Amino acid sequence: MTDSVDAGQNTSSRRRGLTLGVAAIAALAGGGLAWWRLQPHDVLPEAEAQLWQQRFIAPDGAALTLERWRGKPLLVNFWATWCPPCVRELPMLDAFSAQQDQHGIQVIGLAVDKPEAVQRFLGRLPLRFPVALAVEGGLGLTRSLGNLQGGLPFTVLLGADGRIQQRKIGELTTEDLASWSKKG
């Protein structure tokens, strides 16, 4: 009688071990896929040139081109009012922009959002750095810069030479900005 009880317990232990092993492999695979999807991918050859040629409209209706910052390090942050990590990082980017002043990295925010939503948002949280609307083609532009999933926030650091130095999909940290400011 004890042999059949021991055999049943061994079978149950093996099933539990097998189930845990399969679950661990699935978790690792899922984590690896998520990591891969959040990594910036290759930049299309013409993407940097296209970025510099883009013309955006500020919430007040004024035209804004990135060309005016050519020759200076430029941090371009794609964001939206409906994106919680975007909203969380904006005050940090605003402080970073003020700290950099005119002699360091210039910051611009490109809102992938409706103009009315951006205007309301900026009424509640004014930013010291320029903000423009990248509604039409904004996510396409991020994809050409290696953000294949179109995730937000997406930030690109361009060097004074106009070339991409750094990219990040997801919320920036103060450590990111400190590291990037050494490279910009």
Image (cartoon, grey):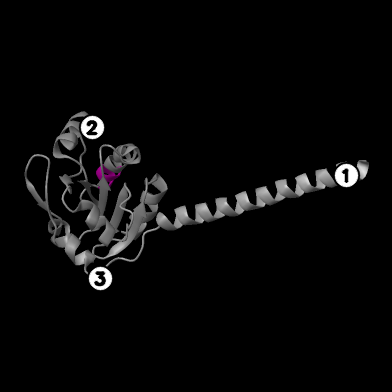
Between circles 3 and 2, the one closer to the viewer is 3
Name the spot of residue 93 as percent of width and height, x first. Answer: 29, 43
Residue 104 visible somewhere in the drawing? no
Amino acid marked by disc 1? Ser
Quadrant of the image occupied by residue 51: bottom left
Task: Tell me the residue at 17%/40% (across/down).
Answer: 114
Q: Residues within 10 Å of mark 2 (few under 14, many from 20)?
A: few
Amino acid marked by disc 3? Pro
Q: Mark 2 = which residue?
A: 125
Task: Tell me the residue at 6%/42% (across/down).
Answer: 61
Q: Which mark is residue 160?
A: none
Between circles 2 and 1, the one closer to the viewer is 1
First in residue order: circle 1 vs circle 3:
1
Dots 1 and 3: beta carbons under 8 Å? no
Taking the magenta stretch, the answer to whether it contains residue 97 is yes
Q: Provide the residue span drawn in magenta.
A: 96-100
Q: Main secondary structure of the magenta part?
A: helix
**Separation of disc 1 and disc 3 at Cα?**
68 Å
Quadrant of the image occupied by residue 144: bottom left
Q: Residues within 10 Å of mark 3 (few under 14, many from 20)?
A: few
Q: Mark 3 = which residue?
A: 45
Amino acid marked by disc 2? Leu
**For residue 28, side relative to residue 148 (left or right):** right
Name the spot of residue 155 as percent of width and height, x first. Answer: 30, 52
Total marks shown come to 3
First in residue order: circle 3 vs circle 2:
3
Q: Mark 1 = which residue?
A: 4
